[in-house]
């Protein structure tokens, strides 16, 4: 196939000595994101059967180069969206190595253009999209590409961007593609927000919301509501925005949408000077953004947590989160990419923090979190942990059935704990809940299921105790009131942490 771009598109990527393996690239993918991508590919008529590529675990077994190219382009697009650029580069390189049709290559270029645009290479992104247009005769794909070109001008030339996107909207309206029309309305609404034309933005979001209701698309509806909530924040209508997002986080959201709603709440509370509340929301988000490798959003969480603790004068925790974020940032510095967005904010804030606080002692976070457990039995420690964790969940759910569904436990199990621990809404243990280190730790476990949260807590607890008791497992067993065999079993993983 003739490459219509003047130079190999891979020359736009930074050189890397080691790329993630294909096995690593299909690990920890959010299935809802992937299925949304494959649905788009199917609607573009690039494949005859959606089931051909909708199973992530089968990608490495595919033999058809076109299916392989599409699948890897989809994965590259997901990693781009999540800000995991190293994996995005690797996935796109695999996609580009396939001997595919012009339509498939055009789709791959469209996904690559999104990566270039996110990294600030707008001109290169437009060049790639224009080349992709010359490759394909697929009318559906052509209009997707034209829409992407419109998005490239969103910040540098919003007037031109609106003109291009409105042409896309007219086309989708004419072809009765309501779903794509609704998404274009969202893009246009975002531009109007940037221009502070909130009335026009609200009209766009109402149109998109109508599509979500008409087509019974609940996740899409949540996306639109998030946009409307963000618009309310920009207008300074914090109470309305807060109510909208609190209702959102009680729904059955995908990890991305849940994290987005939590971050918007964190942003709102920070703007209101409610730093403890902002910490609560960003802590919950961080658990999701690190677990699902949503790196763009994770850097925002690290930055905001460091900033909030700095505002509160709790410099040890501020140093911890700035430092953790910086360690993650170091993994990307060798890529030679421009530091943009919250990556740049985190870097600048941490440098300034270190300059102003050179004498702050390093804080051992585990000591602060688990210090209360010394000399307590394992039974008492578990009761304290369950009390605080369930109390936090009670604060954030409307009723017990909803909480049980979120935790993945039977109502009967919860009511046994309620009776055993004397749980009541609004009542938490004194002392522990006021400890910012312990509270911060428990906040990070709220997005997990009951089983996951308990496993995480006990892994971390035994890792801490193993050091404190200098690996004397017999002494640990005696103090905890459990058998030696149980301590050995519990510390197998802990010794590796």
Image: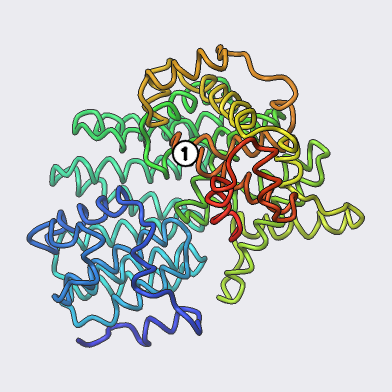
Specify whether 486 is left or right of 126: right
Is 66 situated above or below 249?
below
Q: Residues within 10 Å of mark 1 (few under 14, many from 20)?
A: some
Is 94 situated above or below 201?
below
Residue 307 in picture, x, y percent from top left: 73, 44
Residue 3 in picture, x, y percent from top left: 27, 85
Residue name at image x 35 percent, y 71 percent = 91
Q: Using the image as rendered, state which of residue 477 and residue 396 is in the foreground.
A: 477
Residue 216, quarter of picture: top left
Q: Can see residue 281?
A: yes
> Given the current orientation, which residue lies at the most extreme left position?
48
Residue name at image x 31 percent, y 71 percent = 109
Residue name at image x 33 percent, y 83 percent = 5
Q: Using the image as rendered, state which of residue 464 and residue 295 is in the foreground.
A: 464
Specify whether 280 is left or right of 467: left
Specify whether 177 is left or right of 119: left
Question: Is the C terminus in the top left, top right, bottom left or bottom right quadrant?
Answer: bottom right
Residue 344 in picture, x, y percent from top left: 65, 60
Residue name at image x 47 percent, y 62 percent = 84
Residue 455 in picture, x, y percent from top left: 50, 43
Is 416 situated above or below 6?
above
Element at label 1 = loop
Residue 337, quarter of picture: bottom right
Q: Which residue is mark 1?
A: 448
Q: Can see residue 15?
A: no
Question: Is the N terminus in the top left, top right, bottom left or bottom right quadrant?
Answer: bottom left
Is 309 situated above or below 106?
above
Specify whether 57 is left or right of 312: left
Marks counted in the figure total 1
> Given the current orientation, which residue lies at the most extreme right position?
359
């Amino acid at each position: 196939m003739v490459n219509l771009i003047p130079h190999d598109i891979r020359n736009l990527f930074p050189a890397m000595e080691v790329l993630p393996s294909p096995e690593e690239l299909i690990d920890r993918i959010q299935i809802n994101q992937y299925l949304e991508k494959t649905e788009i590919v199917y609607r573009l008529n690039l494949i005859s059967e959606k089931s051909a590529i909708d199973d992530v675990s089968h990608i490495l077994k595919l033999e058809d180069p076109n299916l392989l190219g599409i699948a890897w382009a989809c994965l590259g697009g997901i990693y781009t969206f999540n800000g995991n650029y190293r994996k995005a580069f690797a996935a796109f390189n695999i996609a580009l190595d396939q001997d595919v049709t012009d339509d498939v290559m055009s789709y791959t270029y469209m996904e690559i253009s999104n990566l270039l645009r996110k990294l600030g290479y707008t001109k290169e992104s437009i060049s790639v999209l224009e080349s992709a247009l010359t490759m394909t005769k697929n009318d559906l794909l052509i209009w997707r590409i034209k829409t992407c070109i419109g998005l490239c001008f969103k910040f540098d030339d919003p007037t031109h961007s609106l003109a291009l996107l409105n042409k896309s909207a007219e086309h989708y309206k004419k072809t009765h593609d309501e779903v794509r029309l609704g998404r274009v309305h969202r893009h246009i609404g975002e531009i109007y927000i940037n221009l502070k034309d909130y009335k026009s933005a609200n009209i766009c979001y109402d149109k998109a919301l109508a599509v979500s209701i008409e087509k019974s698309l609940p996740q899409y509806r949540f996306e639109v509501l998030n946009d409307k909530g963000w618009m309310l924040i920009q207008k300074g209508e914090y109470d309305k925005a807060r109510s909208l997002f609190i209702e959102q986080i009680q729904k059955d959201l995908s990890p991305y949408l849940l994290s987005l709603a939590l971050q918007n709440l964190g942003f709102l509370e920070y703007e209101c000077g409610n730093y403890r509340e902002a910490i609560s929301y960003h802590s919950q988000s961080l658990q999701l953004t690190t677990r699902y490798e949503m790196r763009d959003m994770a850097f925002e969480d690290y930055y905001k947590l460091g900033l909030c603790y700095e505002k509160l004068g709790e410099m040890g925790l501020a140093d911890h989160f700035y430092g953790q974020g910086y360690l993650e940032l170091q993994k990307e510095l060798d890529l030679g990419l421009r530091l943009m967005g919250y990556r740049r904010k985190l870097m600048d804030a941490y440098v300034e923090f270190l300059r102003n606080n050179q004498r702050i002692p390093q804080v051992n976070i585990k000591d602060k979190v688990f210090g209360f457990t010394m000399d307590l039995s394992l039974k008492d420690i578990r009761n304290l942990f369950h009390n605080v964790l369930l109390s936090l969940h009670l604060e954030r759910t409307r009723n017990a059935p909803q909480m049980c569904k979120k935790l993945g436990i039977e109502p009967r199990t919860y009511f046994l704990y309620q009776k055993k621990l004397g749980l009541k809404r609004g009542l938490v243990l004194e002392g522990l809940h006021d400890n910012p280190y312990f509270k911060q730790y428990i906040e990070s476990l709220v997005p997990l299921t009951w089983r996951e949260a308990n496993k995480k807590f006990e892994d971390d607890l035994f890792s801490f105790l193993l050091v404190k008791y200098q690996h004397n497992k017999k002494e640990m067993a005696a103090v905890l009131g459990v058998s030696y065999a149980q301590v050995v079993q519990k510390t197998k993983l802990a010794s590796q942490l």
